[in-house]
Amino acid sequence: MAQQAITLKLAGKSYSLNIDSEKEEVYRLAEREVNNYLAAIKQNNFKNWTDQDYLSMAALKFAIANVDMRQSRELGDEDLKRLGHLGEEIDAYLNALKG
């Protein structure tokens, strides 16, 4: 995989990174999403909040979204297993009818 140097700007600070070239769009979209969320939460003007506080809340938001996504995938896997077992039961029933 080819590497590429990019610079992302998060919360007004630039970060130079070396990434896989095919991942650039993902990094750019993530940069935009973080900065959009920070702008939205800063509109609330929480008293005595620093940029670190806003970044902490952004990190928490994205971590919660990640956990939710993992949990929903786990539920999806369980549903697929149940469907697989139902399929096996139906096959066994149909095979019994043939016999």
Image: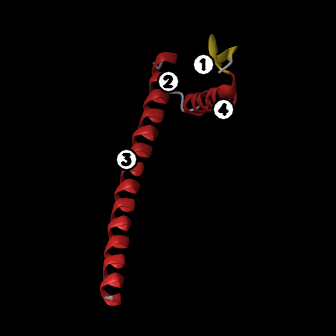
**C-alpha distance separating marks 2 and 4:** 19 Å
Q: Which amino acid, by three-letter code, is at mark 4?
A: Leu
Callout 3, which amino acid?
A: Gln
Q: Nearer the viewer, mark 1 or mark 4?
A: 4
Measure how far apart labels 4 and 3 are at the Cα level: 23 Å
Q: Are marks 2 and 1 in contact (CB under 8 Å)?
A: yes
Q: Nearer the viewer, residue 23 or 30?
A: 23
Q: Which residue is mark 1?
A: 11
Point out the tag, 1 or 4, that comes first from the N-terminus: 1
Figure check: 69 above or below 3: below
Label 3 sits on residue: 71
Q: CA distance from mark 2 to mark 1?
A: 9 Å
Tell me which label, 1 or 3, sits earlier in the chain. Answer: 1
* Secondary structure under the numbered disc 4 in the rendered image: helix
Rendered position, 78 above or below 70: below
From the image, tell me which residue sits under label 2.
54
Mark 4, residue position: 29
